[in-house]
Image (tube, grey):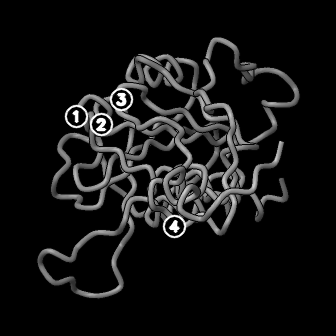
């Protein structure tokens, strides 16, 4: 049923956030289980000829921002990412704020969750996937090669692991990465203004990688 109520009731339902005169009651969106996902096999005819791109999300526990997660999902959907997998212990839930920030992409784009992101990355690496991380300050990474995102060659299925705002990737996630991708700045940066918003950085990185798919005609 459609109920016509005073504006103050809509304000209360939306907890003071802009609602444009309409509120909809809907069931919560759960993360999909990887156990229920159809697994691509790298040796079969279809997926063997495709450039599979998954996006992994894992940072420091408790630091996820719903606006950033929503914006990241919006970019991932638009640019053609095949699947998004998030660490359940590090991620905020798929709230209405996430849905709004994604411009509705989360409603049509399945988001998978795992309790063991490091184990998942290790397993995919053993299957032949390339796991690459992202970093804003190359000096903060040890023992993992760092390259510019424009130098990355996408020649096999890849998982790009994005960290959290401010803290970046957890040390455990970094250890699963074969390489780290960085976005080179266009000028000498002032101290304290030397990084991008995580969803903006993810959009730039994904566009740099996904443009290779378009050049190859996939």
CA gap between label 4 and label 2 equals 20 Å
The image shows residue 38 at horizontal and vertical percentages of 75, 19
Q: Which of the numbered marks, if any, corresponds to residue 95?
A: none
Q: Is residue 181 above or below residue 148?
A: above
> Residue placed at 50% from the left, 44% from the top?
160
User: Contact, CB < 8 Å: mark 3 with mark 2?
Assistant: yes
Residue 1 position by quadrant: top right
| Residue at 48% from the left image edge and 62% from the top image edge | 17
Which residue is outermost to the bottom? 187
Residue placed under numbered mark 2 in the picture: 174
Report helix, strand or loop for mark 2: helix
Secondary-structure class at tag 4: helix
In front of the other: 20 or 156: 20
Identify the mark nearer the N-term, 4 or 3.
3
Name the residue tied to disc 4: 204
Q: Dividing the picture into quarters, in which one does residue 54 lie?
A: top right
Residue under numbered circle 1: 171
Seen from the viewer's position, the closer of residues 94 and 149 is 94
């Amino acid at each position: 049923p459609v109920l016509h109520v005073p504006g103050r009731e809509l304000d209360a339902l939306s907890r003071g956030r802009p609602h444009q005169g309409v509120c909809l009651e809907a069931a919560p969106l759960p993360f999909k289980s990887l156990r229920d996902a159809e697994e691509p096999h790298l040796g079969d005819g279809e997926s063997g000829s495709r450039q599979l791109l998954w996006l992994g999300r894992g940072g420091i526990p408790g630091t996820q921002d719903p606006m950033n997660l929503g914006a990241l999902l919006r970019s991932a959907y638009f640019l053609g990412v095949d699947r998004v997998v998030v660490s359940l212990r590090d991620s905020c839930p798929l709230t209405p704020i996430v849905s709004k920030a994604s411009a509705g992409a989360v409603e049509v784009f399945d988001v998978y969750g795992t309790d063991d992101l490091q184990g998942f990355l290790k397993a995919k690496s053993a299957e032949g996937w390339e796991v690459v991380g992202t970093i804003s300050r190359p000096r903060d990474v040890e023992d993992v090669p760092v390259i510019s995102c424009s130098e990355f060659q996408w020649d096999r299925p890849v998982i790009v692991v994005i960290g959290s705002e401010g803290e970046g990737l957890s040390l455990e996630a970094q250890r699963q990465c074969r390489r780290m991708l960085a976005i080179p700045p266009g000028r000498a940066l002032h101290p304290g203004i030397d990084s991008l918003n995580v969803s903006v950085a993810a959009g730039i990185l994904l566009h740099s990688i996904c443009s290779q798919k378009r050049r190859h005609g996939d």
